[in-house]
Image (spheres, grey):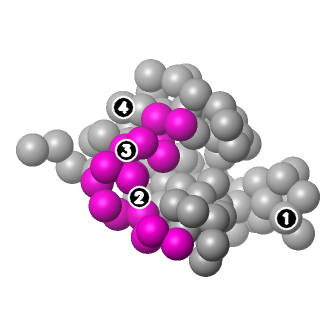
Amino acid sequence: MRTEYEEVSDILANNDVTDADQIEYGSEVFEELMDYYMSSGDMPYGVMKARTGMPDEWIIDRIFELDLLKDTDEKAGLESHYFLKDMI
């Protein structure tokens, strides 16, 4: 059985993702990550339905937790992502 790290790493690699800004709501990589997290049961239902959180934020946070995207300053990278998405 493959780990979450391996699955998500493959999805990112197959879509040539090197930066969190490339994971945009509605993009192919976003849809693949949503499908993975929905089928794995890792993403809370309220987040899936955008009632208790935003799915794209949850996915980006999870990718940073897995340390799959390298940023020199993880927090600054995440804040930049949210800023570009008009979230802050």
Q: Amino acid at mark 2?
A: Leu
* Residue position marked by numbered label 3 in the rendering: 36
- In the image: residue 43, left or right of residue 18: left
Nearest the viewer among 18 and 53 is 53
Q: Considering only order in the chain, which callout, 3 or 1, is on the residue closer to the N terminus?
A: 3
Check if residue 61 falls in the magenta segment. Answer: no
* Residue position marked by numbered label 4 in the rendering: 10
Q: Establish if 22 lies above or below 44.
A: above
* Residue position marked by numbered label 1 in the rendering: 87
Q: CA distance from mark 3 to mark 4?
A: 11 Å
**Percent x, y for residue 16?**
55, 23
Q: Residue furthest bottom?
A: 52
Q: Considering only order in the chain, which callout, 4 or 3, is on the residue closer to the N terminus?
A: 4
* Residue position marked by numbered label 2 in the rendering: 66
Report crowding for label 3: few under 14, some 14 to 19, many 20 or more residues within 10 A (C-alpha). Answer: some
Q: Considering only order in the chain, which callout, 1 or 4, is on the residue closer to the N terminus?
A: 4
Residues drawn in magenta: 31-46
Q: Are marks 3 and 2 in contact (CB under 8 Å)?
A: no
- In the picture, the quarter occupied by the N terminus is top left
The residue sitting at 85% across, 64% down in the picture is 87
Secondary structure of residue under mark 3: helix
